[in-house]
Image: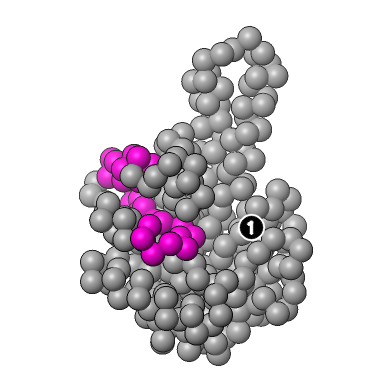
Amino acid sequence: MPLTPTHEIVRRAYADGVGVGAFNVLQLEHAEAIVTGAERADRPVVLQISENTVRYHGGLEPVALASLALARAAKTPVAVHLDHAENPDLVREAVELGLGSVMFDAARLPYEENVATTREVVDHCHRHGVWVEGELGEVGGKGDAHDPGVRTDPGEARAFIAATGVDALAVAVGSVHQMVTRDAVLDLDLVARLRAAVDVPLVLHGSSGVPDPLLARAVAAGMTKVNVSTHLNKAFTGAVRDHLAAHPADVDPRRYLTPARVAVAEAVTHLLGVLAPR
């Protein structure tokens, strides 16, 4: 199957009122498991590579090319996306390597600087047919995520999209990055008001901390792209721990990475069913 552009997957879900799972790739086993889970669910999926993962691998190219190869060989539509890039040079590299979309994160900058920098990135990406996700509001750590001051304002969101030309918008509605418990509280009324205010897909970051019923309600309220990382990492690490506890003499990584890959695939299949039930 040829590589599927991110905009095709997300726009189709946006039109149908369902969610798309966007799962972070930390290494090859994650990417393989995510594709396997999507194939079992018979759902499209987005493989995401974060700037943190790029630093871990010492560069974008190895993990990006592996993810692109898996996406092209998949039996269901799979897109490859650069997540939370703060460096415009990394965005340009992603475009050159053939990734279909990027998330450029300038949300920590003052509003006017965020707009100007994001606009430059959008102009470059659009010249090469690459879809861009921006961010407005801060999806931070547990300490400040429920402060109303970091939530995305619908009017400002509309103005930001008009000024930057982004194709999708990550918004702050109460979720938190890197949560290991699933008890986040989303402002569904704000999700609905944002959906009514803008004409691009909305993106929920920090979705690992959101319980399944609330994820489904968030999609019904207007979320389209739903990003998940920590939840998969918990499944991966838990399976490794269980295997090594039962087989402490094992030294071949394939023996404990195999059940870890299975656990991630199962989690992906389940979440895709939550986001886009039949």
Locate residue 241: give its quadrant: top right
Direction from residue 17 to residue 3 in the image, left or right = left
Locate residue 205: give its quadrant: bottom right
Question: Residue 185: percent from the left, percent from the top?
Answer: 73, 66
Q: Is residue 251 above or below residue 155?
A: above
The reply to whether the magenta stretch includes residue 66 is yes
Residue at 34%, 67% in the rendered image: 131
- Which residue in the protein does label 1 denote? 177
Residue at 48%, 80% in the rendered image: 113
Q: Is residue 161 above or below residue 250?
A: below
Camera-side residue of 166 and 40: 166
Camera-side residue of 89 and 207: 89
Camera-side residue of 18 and 141: 141
Query: Would residue 137 be seen by someone viewing this image from the given angle?
Result: yes
Residue at 38%, 78% in the rendered image: 119
Say which amino acid is labelled 1.
His
Query: Would residue 9 be seen by someone viewing this image from the given angle?
Result: no
Question: Residue 106: percent from the left, percent from the top?
Answer: 50, 71
Q: Residues within 10 Å of mark 1 (few under 14, many from 20)?
A: some
Question: Residue 222: percent from the left, percent from the top?
Answer: 54, 74
Q: Across the whole image, how many numbered discs are drawn on residues?
A: 1
Question: Residue 14: percent from the left, percent from the top?
Answer: 43, 71
In the rendered view, how is the structure colored?
one colour
Direction from residue 256 to residue 166 in the image, left or right = left
Which contiguous range is marked in magenta? 62-91
Direction from residue 240 to residue 180 in the image, left or right = right
Q: Secondary structure at mark 1?
A: loop
The reply to whether the magenta stretch includes residue 270 is no
Residue at 31%, 55% in the rendered image: 93
